[in-house]
Structures are given as C-alpha cells and as structure tokens.
Image (tube, grey):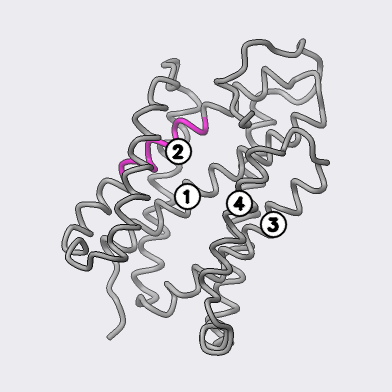
Amino acid sequence: MSFDPYEFDRGYASSQGDTLGQYTAKTFLWMVLGLLVTFGVAVGCWLTNATLYAVYYIPYVHLIVLIATLVISFTMVHRLEKMAVGTAIGLFVLFSALFGFTLSIYLLAFHVTSIVLCFLLTAVYFGALAAYGFFTKRDLSGLRTILFSGLGFLIVFGLLSMFIPGLQMFDRVVCLIGIALFLGYTAYDTQKIRAFYHYYSASPDMLAKASIFSALQLYLDFINLFLYLLRFLGNKRN
C-alpha cells in the first residue's frame, strides 16, 4: 500500500505530543535540510568540475543517478511503514545528495543571476501556496486526480521529447503547465501533513516517518517548481 493518508479508512487514537504547528514546522525543517544538501552538493560539483569529470569518465552516469533516485523514492513510498526512522532519514539525505549532482548540470547550463532569481521566486511562490494549504479550510483531496493526471502528462511528454525533437518547440507551454502543477502540489502536500498528524498522532515512530515522507514530497515540489521556473525564465550560457 502506498504511503498516502487519503487512502486510510481508519486512524490511530490521539495522544499527547507535538502540536500540529510544531509537527508541521519539523516537517518543513526536514525539507530545508534536504534542499541544503542538494544545493550544497550541486555547488560543490560545480566549483570542482566534478560534474564534467563524472560525465566524461563514467558512462551513462545520468542514467545511473536517475535510476538510483527512482529506486529510493519508490522504496520510501512503498516501504516506509516497515523501515526504521533512521533508515528513512538516511534515504532522504541520500536522495537529496544524488539530486544535487543532477542540479549541478543546471548550474553549468544557466547564468548564476538567473539561478538566484528563479530560486527567490520559487521560495516566494512555494511559501504562499504552502501557507494556503496549511490554513485553508477547503478540502484539497479533490485535486488529487487532476494533479496526478498533470504529472503523468509531464512524464509522457518528457519521454516523447527525447525521441521527437520537434516537441521541444512546446517547451515553454509545458513549463507553464509544470509551474501550475507543482504550485498545486505544494498546497495539496502541505495539507496532507495534517492528515498524517491526526492519523499517526499516537505512534511516534510512524509520525516521525510520515514527517520525513511529507518532507520528501515538499522537497520534490520545491525542486520541480524551481527547475520549471528556471527553464521558463532562465538565461542559458552560450
């Protein structure tokens, strides 16, 4: 079973512990830690030219990193309930570090000013939608089908564009769709934190793992929003 509170039909009894606000704050701190690891690795690879060396000397390194990140994310989604809290934390940090290598490629492709601008815009947009998801009384679970369909479209388009170069002319339109999609996911995933908190409030270990899982989702929302904004607004190096 996937680790999704909207699939639950029963809950644990409530118990004393962190308030919802404290639990949410911890989840966002985990997300920030992941971002720091990612951008730290990316900047390190960029400054030391490790990315260029890896691409030149390690065949299919991009594919290796992609498969590794997919395996880690799949494991966290489908095995999180059975793994230890320390293992969940380790996988999250490892995922963040591996993604840092991927991000370092963008540092080579775009001007630093564009990267900084898009990062600041991402922080503002992400913060606004996260606040909406946390404070709104509206149930956002109804967005799940729309968001999942949009994500499927982006994945299929990305795969097809690898084999049909002509599709790249629609890249800016796709970027706008990606921006809108991950803004929606930000609000949706932030609201899911509340569902995890109420469901697992009597199980400290599960609550801690749910926090890591939510941090991973929010981390991916932030990173993807940043990358689509960078592709849409960024200036590439010559």
Which residue bears the numbered disc 1? 222
Which residue bears the numbered disc 4? 32
Q: Which residues are magenta?
A: 180-190
Residue 223 position in % (x across, y down): 47, 54
**Marks 2 & 4, CB-CB < 8 Å contact:** no
Q: In this image, 73 relative to 181: left or right?
A: right
Residue flagged by tag 3: what amino acid is it? Answer: Val
Residue 127 position in % (x across, y down): 45, 42
Q: Earlier in the sequence, mark 2 or mark 3?
A: 3
Q: Nearer the viewer, mark 4 or mark 1?
A: 1
Q: Quadrant of the N terminus?
A: top right
Q: Quadrant of the C terminus?
A: bottom left
Q: CA distance from mark 2 to mark 3?
A: 20 Å
Q: Nearer the viewer, residue 189 or 73?
A: 73
Residue flagged by tag 4: what amino acid is it? Answer: Val
Which residue bears the numbered disc 3? 93
Residue flagged by tag 1: what amino acid is it? Answer: Phe
Kind of element beneath mark 4: helix
Which residue bears the numbered disc 2? 186
